[in-house]
Image (cartoon, helix red, strand yellow):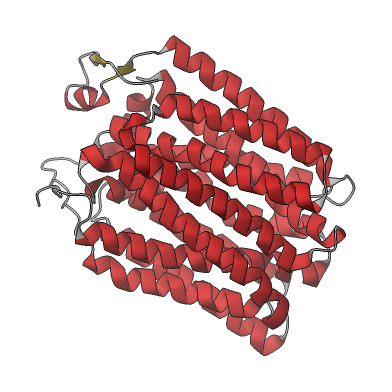
Amino acid sequence: MTPPAKLWNRSFVVWLLASGQSQLGTALSGIALSFLVLHQTGHAGAMAVTLACAVGPNLLMPLSGAWVDRLPLRLPLIAADVTRGVLQLTVALLVLHLGSLPLWVINAAALLGGFAGIFAGPASSAAFPQLVPESQLARANGLFGSVTQGAWLLGTLVGGVLVARLGPPAAILIDGASFLVMAALLPLVRLRGREVVTGPRPTVVADLLAGLRLMRRSKTLTLIPFIGLVLNGVLATVTVVTPKLMEHLGAGAAGYGVFLAVEGVGAVLGGALIAWLGARIPPRRATAAGLLLCGLIYSVMARFTVYPVLIGCSLLLGFAFTVLNTPLTTLMQSMVPGPYLGRVFAVMGTVGTLGMPVTLLLVSPLLDRYPAGLFFGVAGGVMLAGCAAWVRVVRSERLLPDLHAEAQTPEVPPAVTAAPL
């Protein structure tokens, strides 16, 4: 199949619509699950354990990513969405029937959903560059971010009210249905077939090691997973401490929904800016700006833990996250050859979440003992340190290596091409 000739083609539009409605369900479920666990246990630490179960399987993502690079991409995408949809529907129906669920059942469902996600994530990252012309990749990522964040915005606006009035199961039911809708729409997306490998096939571990060797050719590409580690580790702690802070401030689930919704507005604005400017945004400079802005915002939140300030900061955080993440994703998609995308994005996902389960389990006893401002302050310091490390690497590697040439002739050192910082 030839690459698409224009940005607005059927596959890209279907992907946008399917991803948007799925993100809507995820936003609803995120609020619902947080308050389901919080109301049943009364402890923020229990929420941290549940989140750790959901992200723990990411430790195996490099192997799943190498396996995904061998498969037709629709297979892991559809199977993962069906699995997660059935799990969410089962949890919601059990809560409706029984009134409550043992925490171990909720955590088991989160763990199984996490295992499904380690196949969906790399497959989705590998499929996206096939949907649009390479010259339109930056705009496509900006549009994708705007649509999914807009859906997230709607989900958080509705989710807080829905959970407050109807309870968590209603929102979890919608999330389960959205996964099944995503699975039903994916056959309409056209994806190029994988090349047929003749002769002995390398093992999955050998494929993974080949991806790691490719990443080592670039200092920038090697650092990207660790930037993900900084960002996701910070977000994990902040995510579990914020709902209880909202309860303390009297805002509750509805107030938390507004907080997330305003953050979504900022993300939509950031995505719209990237879609408008497209390739004119230097991705590495945008990443540095996003890290710096995140660190400063968290520092303000640490100093002023009052609801109006938190709402204002959430708007800026959403914008900063998009300015950080979207150009970074575009940079990886343009640098990494297609046959390596699954495993390279899987390595990024694994390292990015490597510290999350351990961090959450370590901090869970502290979440109920120390004020939220302390955790916001630590988050700000970590983000600023990440910014300093990123700037140092960018300055040491002003020209990016041509990894596409490296993938074709691995015995020859890659050529160097000019790229915007």
The residue shown at (43%, 22%) is 220
**Residue 404 image-quadrant placement:** top left
**Residue 51 image-quadrant placement:** bottom right
Q: Residue 58: percent from the left, percent from the top?
A: 51, 48
The residue shown at (61%, 63%) is 30
Q: Residue 1: percent from the left, percent from the top?
A: 10, 52
Query: In the drawing, does residue 11 fall left or right of residue 123?
Result: left
Query: In the drawing, does residue 81 fall left or right of residue 372?
Result: left
**Residue farthest along the bottom direction in this orientation:** 97
Residue 296 in the image: above or below residue 417: below
- Residue placed most toward the observer, 4 or 150: 150
Q: Residue 414: percent from the left, percent from the top?
A: 24, 16
Residue 365 in the image: above or below residue 234: below
The residue shown at (22%, 67%) is 188
Q: Quadrant of the C terminus?
A: top left
Query: In the drawing, does residue 109 fall left or right of residue 418?
Result: right
